[in-house]
Every structure is written in C-alpha cells, then in structure tokens.
Amino acid sequence: MCMSRLHRAVTAPADGWITVENAEGRLHRVSLIALEGPEPQVGDWLVVHSGYALQRVDSEQAAAIVSELRAGQEALS
C-alpha cells in the first residue's frame, strides 16, 4: 500500500523535478507535474505520494506533524 508522506524541499526545482527529504532524513526525487501553483522553494513542505508532489503544507502545520511523527517513532523504540 502506498501512503502520502510529508517532505521538505531541499533543492530548487529543475525541469519539473525536485529533491525532497522526508521526516526520517531520506532524500527522494519527485515530480512536480501534479502540484498546482508556483514552483516550491527550498524549505517548503510538500505532501508526496508515489513520486509526485501533490500539495503544499504551511510550515507551522508541518512542524506539528513532524513533531508527532518523531514522538511516535521514539515511543516505538
């Protein structure tokens, strides 16, 4: 099963692609073809699903989500 995940842009877009980092620190190259609006900038948070950036998430909401994900991971350790 595929899941949408929160990622932070770590490079500027180039030719419709961008490199993003997930909450665990893994880098992925994803397509921007499904993302509406202006191209994301370094530091922007995006919802990514199956290699496609789908929507933006504001930084406050992203920080809360990442905090909850990390707390959940620590609880499982």
Image (cartoon, rainbow, N blue to C red):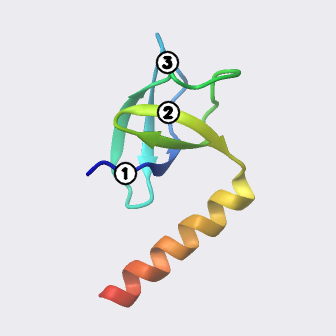
In percent of width and height, residue 5 lies at: 44, 51
Contact between marks 2 and 1 (CB within 8 A): the answer is: no
Residue 17 vs 19, above or below: the answer is above
Q: Which mark is residue 33?
A: 3
Residue 16 vs 36, above or below: the answer is above
In percent of width and height, residue 46 lies at: 56, 42
Residue 40 vs 22, above or below: the answer is above
Q: In this view of the protein, which residue sits in the foreground, 49 or 46?
A: 49
- Please state the total of marks drawn on the protein image: 3
Farthest-out residue, left: 1
Is residue 44 in view from this perspective? no
Horizontal side, residue 57 vs residue 3: left or right: right
Name the residue that disc number 1 marks. Answer: 3
In percent of width and height, residue 18 lies at: 46, 27
Name the residue that disc number 2 marks. Answer: 53
Contact between marks 3 and 1 (CB within 8 A): the answer is: no
- The amino acid marked with disc number 3 is Ile
| Residue at disc 1, secondary structure | loop
Q: Residue at x 43, y 48 (%)?
A: 4
Crowding at dot 2, Cα within 10 Å, few <14 / some 14-19 / many 20+, comes out as many
Q: Residue at x 34, y 37 (%)?
A: 50
For marks 2 and 1 on the same chain, the one whose residue lies earlier in the sequence: 1
Crowding at dot 3, Cα within 10 Å, few <14 / some 14-19 / many 20+, comes out as few
Q: CA distance from mark 3 to mark 1?
A: 18 Å
Farthest-out residue, top: 15
Horizontal side, residue 70 vs residue 37: left or right: left
